Every structure is written in structure tokens, then in C-alpha cells.
């Protein structure tokens, strides 16, 4: 019979192979699901080619003139948020509220844009970035304060703050910040040119947010792999008792990781409203803050891996939209793939500390009657 045998130490090879196994299993299960959906059980025939949705999900979004541009735009907020989350998770600080920090960052940047509406100054955009970063930072400081001062669970606090931020967004967009010339639609004024993040290329939607995300990847790699504070973060997460014995401050690491995570999430929110949407609307995120959790773990909490994982998950967003248009499948197809990917990744991670072995079943010896 097959059994799991503990490894003497974690397998580094499986650390990099398990995402590949998870992706392969996700693609296979996706093919099975598409086959079932395209099979007519009355006539026992396929009504369509089950490979078509798979092709439209993984390949079609990359074709065309704007395929790679759209992929980079979708990946930008995911990578930014996931870099900050990876720092938290390395230190065993469970920030689940990046969606709220993203939202508050977008609100803070929008507030600056609307307060100086029509002002044509090069200082406006940097001020919006600072406001967005501070908005996310302040929202992340709340769970940091409650964790370090009252030992409250940062997981629950940060998660509950997501709903507070969402209600704050609704209040502003339906109330004080509603466009007076917007025919009563729940949306703010469209940002004027000075309040928009500039495009990188003429005629392209790709904006300055993408290079910022790449800088965050480089900065995260240097911080986690080439600095003393990065070493402290990893030691505190892997061996907290050893970290305390070495004199590392747990409270300082909690504050640092949560504030950096909130700052990056706030910048991501600002980039979305000022670089892509160009106004505040009730829905400014398809769940980037929660999806970035998948990106962080799929990338093995490594900045370079997060960059690749961000591109893959961004493809799932675009693929979900494509199969909805081309194959008439539900919009939730993208979320289904993301969920399966996380499920198989967690299942594959069992092999980090265990290996499969064949164990022969030996019958119990019979007792000899006396």
C-alpha cells in the first residue's frame, strides 16, 4: 500500500516542482470540466471541441496587438500586493486585508485628485502617489497596533477592515464624491490629464505602474535576500525562539512587514484608479488583494517567483473574460482556475516534508491455540 514517509528535511527540489505539478493538475482538471460542459448526454456526443475553451483561456489572451500589454496591466497590482504579502508571511504575520489597504490607497489618491481638480501641475501626481501609499500604510497600521499592543489577531483585524474600506468606498462614490455632471451614476469625476499616470508608449494602455512593480520586485529581492532585516524576517518566521534569543525584535518586524505591505497595496490601488480606470467607481478591484495571496504562495514567497506567478494569475483573469465571450462560459471560470491552482498547490506542498513509499501489508501472525 502507498504511504507518506516523513523526510529528514524539506525537499528543495519539490519546492520548485510543486507549482509545476499544481499547474499541470489545474490544466488537466480544467480540460475535464470543459469536456463535461460540452458533452451532450442525450446524444453522447460533444457539442463543441473541449480543447477550445482551454486554448481560449491560456493562449488567445496573449495573441493580438494588445495581448501582452493587457497581461502586464493585470499583473501589475497583483505583483505589487504579493511582494508585500510575501514579506508578512515570511515573518508569520498573516495580513489577509490587502484588499482593504488597496481600496484605501485608491481613495486617498482620488481625494488628492478631486481636491486639486483642474490644477495642471507636475507635483499633483507625486502627491497622489504619496497619498495612496500613506492610505494603505495607515490602514495596515491598525492591525499592527492591535497585534503588538493587545495581541489581537492581525488575520481577523485586517480581514474585517476590508469590509470597512468597501463601505467607505460606497459612501464616497454614492455621496460626496459623486460626479455632479455624471447623470446620477455612482462614479467620481474623470481625472484630468495631470492626475493620470502617463502611458509608456503612444497608443498603448501600458502605464508607469508596470516599471514600479518591477522596481518592487528588485527591491523585495534585495531586502529579503541581501539585508540584515530580511534575515531577521526569515529567522523570526522560521524559528521565533531562536530569533528572540538572538535579540531580534518581534514587534519591529511586525510593524515593518505590515507597513511595507500596506504601502505597496495602497500604491497598487492608486495605480489602478489613476492609470487604468481614471476615476473612482464602486468596483475598483476584481479581488486583487485576495488573489495576491495565491500569487505570493505560488511564487514561493520569492519576489522573482511572484513576478512569474503574477503573470500566470493575470492570464487567468484575461482567460476568464475570453472564454466568457468566445465560449459563453460563466465569468467565474477564472476564479475556478485560481481556486483549483491554490488547492493543488497546497496539496503538492505536502511533498515538501513527505515522500510517497510503497509499504507491504503484512498480516498479523496468528496465535497458536494451546
Image (cartoon, grey):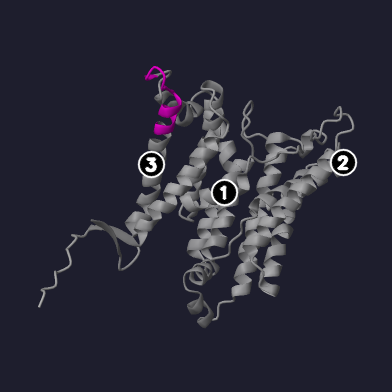
Res. 251 image quadrant: bottom right
Mark 1: secondary structure = helix
Q: Is residue 190 above or below residue 341?
A: above
Mark 2: secondary structure = loop
Distance from the alpha carbon under mark 1 to that under mark 2? 30 Å
Which of these two is toward me, 144 or 217? 144
What number is the disc on residue 292? Answer: 1
For residue 311, say whether it is visible. no
Q: Residue 304 placed where, x, y %?
A: 47, 50
Q: Residue 166 placed where, x, y %?
A: 74, 47
Counting residues from the N terminus, which is met first, the one under dot 2 or under dot 3? 3
Left or right of 249, for residue 60: left
Q: Residue at image x 19%, y 60%?
A: 361
Q: Is residue 203 above or below residue 309?
A: above
Residue of label 2: 175
Distance from the alpha carbon under mark 3 to that under mark 1? 21 Å
Q: Give the range drawn in magenta.
A: 32-45
Which of these two is toward me, 58 or 3? 3
Residue of label 3: 25
Left or right of 359, for residue 210: right
Counting residues from the N terminus, which is met first, the one under dot 3 or under dot 1? 3
Amino acid at each position: 500500500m502507498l504511504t507518506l514517509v516523513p523526510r529528514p528535511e524539506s525537499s528543495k527540489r519539490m519546492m520548485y516542482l510543486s507549482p509545476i505539478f499544481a499547474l499541470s493538475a489545474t490544466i488537466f482538471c480544467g480540460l475535464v470540466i470543459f469536456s463535461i460542459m460540452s458533452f451532450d448526454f442525450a446524444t453522447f456526443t460533444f457539442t463543441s471541441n473541449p480543447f477550445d475553451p482551454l486554448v481560449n483561456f491560456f493562449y488567445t489572451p496573449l495573441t493580438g496587438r494588445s495581448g501582452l500589454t493587457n497581461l502586464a496591466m493585470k499583473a501589475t497590482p497583483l505583483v505589487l500586493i504579493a511582494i508585500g504579502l510575501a514579506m508578512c508571511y515570511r515573518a508569520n504575520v498573516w495580513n489577509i486585508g490587502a484588499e482593504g489597504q488597496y481600496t484605501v490607497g485608491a481613495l486617498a489618491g482620488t481625494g488628492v485628485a478631486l481636491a486639486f481638480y483642474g490644477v495642471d501641475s507636475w507635483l499633483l501626481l507625486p502627491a497622489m502617489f504619496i497619498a495612496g501609499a500613506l492610505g494603505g500604510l495607515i490602514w495596515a497600521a491598525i492591525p499592527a497596533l492591535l497585534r503588538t499592543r493587545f495581541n489581537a489577531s492581525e488575520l481577523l483585524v485586517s480581514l474585517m477592515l476590508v469590509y470597512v474600506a468597501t463601505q467607505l468606498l460606497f459612501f464616497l462614490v454614492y455621496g460626496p464624491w459623486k460626479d455632479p455632471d455624471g447623470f446620477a451614476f455612482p462614479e467620481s469625476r474623470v481625472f484630468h490629464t495631470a492626475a493620470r499616470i502617463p502611458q509608456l508608449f503612444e497608443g498603448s494602455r501600458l502605464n508607469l505602474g508596470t516599471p514600479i512593480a518591477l522596481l518592487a520586485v528588485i527591491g523585495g529581492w534585495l531586502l529579503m535576500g541581501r539585508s540584515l532585516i530580511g534575515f531577521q524576517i526569515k529567522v523570526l518566521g522560521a524559528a521565533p525562539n531562536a530569533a528572540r534569543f538572538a535579540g531580534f525584535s518581534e514587534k519591529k518586524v511586525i510593524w515593518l512587514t505590515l507597513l511595507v505591505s500596506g504601502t505597496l497595496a495602497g500604491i497598487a490601488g492608486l495605480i489602478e484608479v489613476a492609470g487604468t480606470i481614471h476615476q473612482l467607481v464602486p468596483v475598483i478591484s476584481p479581488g486583487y488583494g485576495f488573489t495576491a495571496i495565491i500569487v505570493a504562495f505560488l511564487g514561493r514567497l520569492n519576489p522573482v517567483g511572484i513576478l512569474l506567478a503574477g503573470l500566470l494569475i493575470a492570464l487567468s483573469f484575461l482567460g476568464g473574460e475570453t472564454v466568457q465571450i468566445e465560449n459563453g462560459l460563466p465569468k467565474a471560470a477564472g476564479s475556478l482556475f485560481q481556486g483549483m491552482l491554490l488547492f493543488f498547490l497546497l496539496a503538492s506542498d505536502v511533498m515538501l516534508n513527505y515522500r510517497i513509499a510503497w509499504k507491504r501489508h503484512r498480516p498479523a501472525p496468528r496465535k497458536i491455540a494451546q
